Amino acid sequence: MRLLLVEDNQADADFLAASLRRQRAGDVQLVTVGSLKDATAQLGVPQVPPFDVVLLDLHLPDGSGLQCVDVIHSVNDTIPIVVLSGQDDEEFAISILNKGVQDYLVK
């Protein structure tokens, strides 16, 4: 499984990578980028194997909130997106899920 993590906070990215190692998820390849620009570059190039899911932070240097989802969907509208957010707001979570996101996880 290939995961594209779009996260500008290095501590959060390191935590996720360490969590995968602790779970001995050797069959998971984690590719981390720190901006929407870098994410669209990764998604815009055919990958072998392709990414299976995007783990998406919603507070990035070049985008925030629903805009982040729209940018990812503009490049690949079929890839599953799981939002990782520090915002524990049920109403916002529902609105983001209604945009076609598969899940909303609070960091």
Image (cartoon, grey):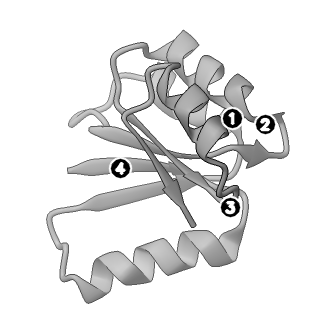
Residue type beneath disc 3: Gly
Residue type beneath disc 4: Leu
- In the rendered view, would you say 10 is above or below 41? below
- In the rendered view, would you say 4 is above or below 7? above
Label 3 CA crowd tier, 10 Å (few <14, some 14–19, many 20+): few
Which mark sits nearer the N-terminus, 4 or 3? 4
Q: CA distance from mark 3 to mark 1?
A: 18 Å
Q: CA distance from mark 4 to mark 2?
A: 20 Å
- In the rendered view, would you say 63 is above or below 34? above
Residue designated by label 1: 36
At horizontal 23% and vertical 34% (from top left) the residue drawn is 48
106 lies left or right of 30:
right
At horizontal 61% and vertical 72% (from top left) the residue drawn is 12
Measuring from the top left, give residue 53's x and y in whole percent: 34, 40
Q: From the viewer's side, name the closer residue of 103 and 90.
A: 90
Label 1 CA crowd tier, 10 Å (few <14, some 14–19, many 20+): many
Quadrant of residue 45 in the image? top left
Q: CA distance from mark 2 to mark 3?
A: 12 Å
Measuring from the top left, give residue 60's x and y in whole percent: 77, 46
Residue designated by label 4: 3
Residue designated by label 3: 86
At horizontal 66% and vertical 37% (from top left) the residue drawn is 92
Q: Secondary structure at mark 1?
A: helix
Residue designated by label 2: 64
| Residue 41 visible to the viewer | no
Q: Secondary structure at mark 4?
A: strand
Q: CA distance from mark 4 to mark 1?
A: 15 Å
Which mark sits nearer the N-terminus, 2 or 3? 2
60 lies left or right of 66:
right
Which mark sits nearer the N-terminus, 4 or 1? 4
